[in-house]
Image: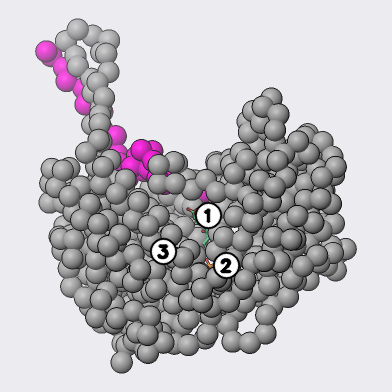
């Protein structure tokens, strides 16, 4: 029985659950003989057993994607758009069931999971629309007998590798632009969250996606699947979201064939509260940014800098709100914080707190793992945090808010930029002059000003420095899957 009662009590097994990958329009395990379990991190219960597909199945999927790509690219954009639009409609119509699958395998609260499904679907809707607007350009030529123009064409077969923290949205924001512009895809979700990816593929099939256009490989050998995707010459681009460490490996592997890469990697987001900020709004923003997805988000506030005049008040107000956050199984109503993804995830959070406390930080609230089944960590606030502590340098990926004290604008900008990461930053301030100065000085790909949430399918998501390459979402997101071709017509 591939699906256990721990899963089917939340979602009917016949709906969009399949116990295999999806290659060339067929549900198949290929030649895989081993299996792996998918586990609910809130309870430790096994939800499903899936075939452990690997490099051989990936190669078969690449062949299918390669064969399907010319016909898919040759379709009128309106026809590709229509398939994506049907897929979007199906996701929205089935948002509750998809959210239940997501909560079961990943743990985030059901309402948040439903929010992610709609957010994921929004990328498909957006690129269904953008598919029809891939414009080239004409260039005024320097000679009268010439005409110069640029056309845009799909890069070809794309390999996507995605993490567990947003099991739906990380997939759709890569494959929606890729498919919209005429690429075909081989997709590998995280081993912890393959069921959401399977459900998305089942809906894509129902939406009429032609065979070979979207292929899915499920398995636990990320390195082997990654090597095949990077090393196979039929794949022209890799798009990855995950740790900087793995991003570096993939970029290295792609260098042999000068393969295109889009990388959305780790962050170390500063969240700055100036003394002229609306403190209540800053507290709300900090809660949203820090504790969304139990802090397992690459854009979530990792270092909270508070100007010394408002430090104590901010800490008190934040603690009063954090106290109200309920931790538990994401299926329970009212729960705001679910489990961390696994033992490795919780061990990293414990180590960051231990290191900070050993170096002089104070625990205002939380600070510990919650006993019992599941990997729950209490929402935590640390004060008197210093730059020598690990929390200042590394992404914690958990519900820990470390509060740093600062005095001047120059000082906080220097501290905020003192990291190899450059994904998201946030600040709260009143004075408009300061707003512009700080926004321009922060070395980040995205800056939230007087807001703790800025993700949107309409905006370019991505980082600078070691946080990655490329942008996802918005009209710019399509460019990452397009090649420019310059045409020069002479002798006219
Ligand atoms: N930017 C972001 O959104 C994310 C950042 N992170 C950061 O990374 C830390 C570790 O999380 P983790 O889940 O281990 O992240 P990873 O980067 O290891 O995993 C992300 C994806 O990459 C795959 N993968 C792992 N190793 C390779 C490889 N050598 N070649 C190709 N693919 C590979 C994984 O597959 P498999 O699941 O089979 O291992 C998964 O699909 C977190 O604590 C967090 O700091 C994590 C997730 C998302
Ligand atoms: O990379 C991540 O951690 C997911 C970002 C979620 C978002 O789009 O806000």
In the image, taking residue 411 as reference, residue 252 lies left or right, namely left
Q: Quadrant of the C terminus?
A: top left
State which quadrant residue 473 falls in. top left
Q: Is residue 439 above or below residue 403?
A: above
Residue count near mark 3 (Cα–Cα under 10 Å), binned few <14, some 14–19, many ≥20: many
Query: Ligand 1 closer than 8 Å to the CB at disc 1?
Result: yes
What residue is disc 1 on? 265
Tell me residue 319's x, y (percent).
75, 61
What are the residue bounds of the magenta stretch? Answer: 468-492
Q: Are marks 1 and 2 in contact (CB under 8 Å)?
A: no
In the image, taking residue 169 as reference, residue 367 lies left or right, namely right
Give the residue displayed 76% in from the left and 36% down from the top: 276
Q: Earlier in the sequence, mark 1 or mark 2?
A: 1
Find numbered disc 3 in the image and state the secondary structure of the residue it sits on.
helix
What residue is disc 2 on? 336
Q: Quadrant of the N terminus?
A: bottom left
User: Mark 1, mark 3: which one is toward the viewer?
Assistant: 3
Q: Is residue 135 above or below residue 248?
A: above
Which residue is the extreme one toward the bottom? Answer: 1
Q: Are marks 1 and 3 in contact (CB under 8 Å)?
A: no
What residue is disc 3 on? 114
The residues tagged by marks 1 and 2 sit, at their Cα atoms, a distance apart of 26 Å
């Amino acid at each position: 029985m591939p699906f256990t009662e721990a899963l089917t009590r939340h979602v009917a097994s016949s709906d969009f659950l399949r116990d295999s990958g999806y290659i060339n329009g067929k549900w198949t395990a290929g030649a895989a003989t081993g299996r792996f379990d998918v586990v609910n991190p809130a309870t430790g219960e096994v939800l499903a057993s899936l075939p452990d597909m690997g490099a051989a199945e990936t190669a078969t999927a690449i062949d299918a994607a390669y064969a399907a790509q010319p016909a898919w690219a040759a379709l009128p954009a309106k026809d590709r758009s229509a398939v994506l639009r049907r897929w979007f409609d199906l996701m929205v119509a089935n948002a509750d069931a998809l959210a239940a699958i997501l909560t079961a395998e990943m743990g985030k609260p059901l309402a948040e999971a439903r929010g992610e499904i709609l957010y994921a679907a929004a990328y498909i809707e957006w690129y269904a629309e953008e598919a029809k607007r891939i414009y080239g350009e004409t260039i005024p030529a320097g000679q009268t007998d010439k005409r110069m123009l640029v056309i845009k064409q799909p890069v070809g077969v794309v390999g996507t590798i995605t993490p567990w923290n947003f099991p739906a949205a990380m997939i759709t924001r890569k494959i929606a632009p890729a498919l919209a512009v005429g690429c075909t895809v081989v997709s590998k979700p995280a081993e912890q969250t393959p069921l959401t990816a399977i459900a998305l593929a089942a809906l894509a099939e129902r939406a009429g996606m032609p065979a070979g256009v979207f292929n899915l490989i499920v398995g636990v050998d990320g390195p082997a699947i990654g090597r095949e995707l990077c090393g196979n010459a039929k794949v022209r681009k890799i798009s990855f979201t995950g740790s900087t460490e793995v991003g570096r490996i993939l970029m290295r592997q792609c260098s042999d064939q000068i393969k295109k890469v889009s990388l959305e990697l780790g962050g170390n987001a500063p969240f700055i509260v100036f003394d002229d900020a609306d403190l209540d709004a800053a507290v709300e923003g900090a809660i949203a940014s820090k504790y969304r997805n139990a802090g397992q988000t690459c854009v979530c506030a990792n270092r909270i800098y508070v100007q010394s005049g408002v430090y104590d008040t901010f800490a008190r107000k934040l603690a009063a709100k954090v106290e109200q956050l309920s931790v538990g199984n994401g299926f329970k109503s009212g729960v705001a914080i679910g489990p961390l993804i696994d033992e490795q995830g919780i061990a990293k959070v414990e180590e960051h707190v231990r290191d900070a406390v050993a170096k002089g930080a104070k625990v205002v609230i939380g600070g510990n793992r919650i006993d019992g089944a599941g990997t729950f960590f209490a929402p935590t606030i640390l004060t008197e945090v210093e730059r020598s502590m690990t929390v200042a340098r590394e992404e914690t990926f958990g519900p820990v808010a470390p509060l740093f004290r600062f005095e001047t604008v120059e000082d906080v900008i220097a501290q905020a930029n003192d990291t190899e990461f450059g994904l998201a930053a946030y600040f709260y301030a009143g004075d408009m002059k300061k707003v512009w100065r700080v926004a321009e000085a922060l070395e980040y790909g995205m800056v939230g000003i007087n807001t703790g949430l800025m993700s949107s399918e309409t905006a370019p998501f991505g980082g600078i420095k070691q946080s990655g390459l490329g942008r996802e979402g918005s009209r710019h997101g399509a460019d990452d899957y397009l090649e420019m071709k310059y045409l020069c017509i002479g002798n006219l």
